[in-house]
Image (tube, rainbow, N blue to C red):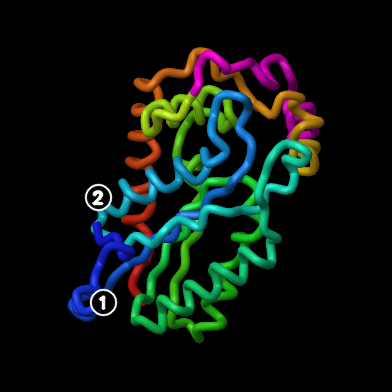
């Protein structure tokens, strides 16, 4: 892995000149994750996923974009940027990477609310770069079998595996969709995308109380195996 923030300029330019490099941009958020998880949860998880992927594939790892589109969590705490702001930041970064002769970029997303911003960003950047840049946007939770949650079993387990900043004594059951049909779940998801507190009351989607570090390590391993396979099968080189 080449973590660009810790490299010296001459060495970094030499590395880039040596062979075609692939860059990874992790994107997270700062928002509530219930009473037991830090507000940095999405950013912490995606940073770890991107770091491990970069280690396995020897990619260039960029610093995480910590802020995301999280307005739906109001009045719970969130520090949000507009979709247009995130889009501009990512566009500028990718074009800047191209100016440094890095022609392939993986954006690894860690927050559900960022997805609208990332939709079709690959096509827009391909057009802006006159087909000289390839960008792939991948949300990490699409690479596991378990149902995604928010502050529930999955996120809490992963955080137990990567962080010491989890307060399991404060963990509480949130919205659980067991017994609901797909139409009811879809309705709740639409409500949550507009106002998460109205859908979940305490800000948790799922039940974190039985989460363990062991489960977190297994889930992370599954995500990384599947993500690495996906990345290896994509047409990287321009």
> What's drawn in magenta, residue-wise?
167-189
Q: Is residue 152 above or below residue 82?
A: above
Seen from the viewer's position, the closer of residues 212 and 40 is 40
Instruction: Determine whether the residue tagged by mark 2 lies in a helix, strand or loop.
Output: helix
Q: Is residue 214 above or below residue 190?
A: above
Q: Is residue 19 above or below residue 72?
A: below
Q: Indicate whether residue 177 is drawn in magenta.
A: yes
Label 2, label 1: how far apart the Cα atoms are: 23 Å
Instruction: Determine whether the residue tagged by mark 1 lies in a helix, strand or loop.
Output: helix
Q: Nearer the viewer, mark 2 or mark 1?
A: 1
Q: Position of residue 217 (x, y in %)?
A: 34, 28
Q: Quadrant of residue 181?
A: top right
Q: Quadrant of the N terminus?
A: bottom left
Q: Quadrant of residue 158?
A: top left
Left or right of 99 in this view: 14? left
Few, some or many C-alpha atoms within 10 Å of disc 1 (few <14, some 14-19, many ≥20)? few
Q: In the image, what residue occupies the spot 25% across and 61% down?
A: 2
Seen from the viewer's position, the closer of residues 101 and 238 is 101
Q: In the image, what residue occupies the spot 65% across and 49% down?
A: 79
Q: Quadrant of the C terminus?
A: bottom left
Left or right of 33 in this view: 52? left
Label drawn at residue 56: 2
Report the residue marked by disc 1: 9
């Amino acid at each position: 892995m080449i973590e660009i923030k810790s490299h010296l300029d001459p060495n970094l330019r030499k590395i880039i000149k040596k062979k075609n490099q692939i860059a990874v941009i992790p994107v997270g958020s700062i928002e509530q994750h219930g009473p037991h998880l830090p507000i940095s949860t999405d950013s912490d998880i995606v940073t770890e996923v991107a770091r491990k992927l970069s280690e396995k594939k020897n990619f260039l790892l960029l610093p995480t974009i910590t802020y995301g589109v999280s307005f739906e969590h109001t009045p719970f705490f969130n520090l949000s940027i507009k979709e247009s702001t995130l889009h501009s930041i990512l566009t500028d970064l990718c074009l800047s990477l191209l100016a440094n002769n890095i022609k392939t970029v993986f954006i690894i997303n860690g927050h559900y609310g960022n997805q609208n911003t990332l939709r079709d960003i690959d096509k827009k950047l391909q057009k802006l770069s006159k087909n000289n840049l390839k960008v792939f946007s991948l949300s990490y939770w699409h690479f596991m079998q378990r149902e995604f949650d928010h502050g529930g079993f999955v996120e809490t387990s992963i955080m137990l595996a990567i962080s010491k900043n989890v307060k399991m004594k404060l963990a509480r059951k949130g919205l659980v969709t067991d017994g609901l049909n797909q139409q009811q779940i879809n309705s709740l998801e639409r409500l949550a995308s507009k106002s998460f507190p109205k859908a979940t009351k305490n800000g948790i989607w799922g039940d974190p109380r039985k989460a363990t570090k062991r489960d977190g390590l297994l889930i992370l391993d599954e995500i990384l195996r599947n993500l690495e396979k996906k990345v290896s099968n994509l047409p990287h080189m321009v």
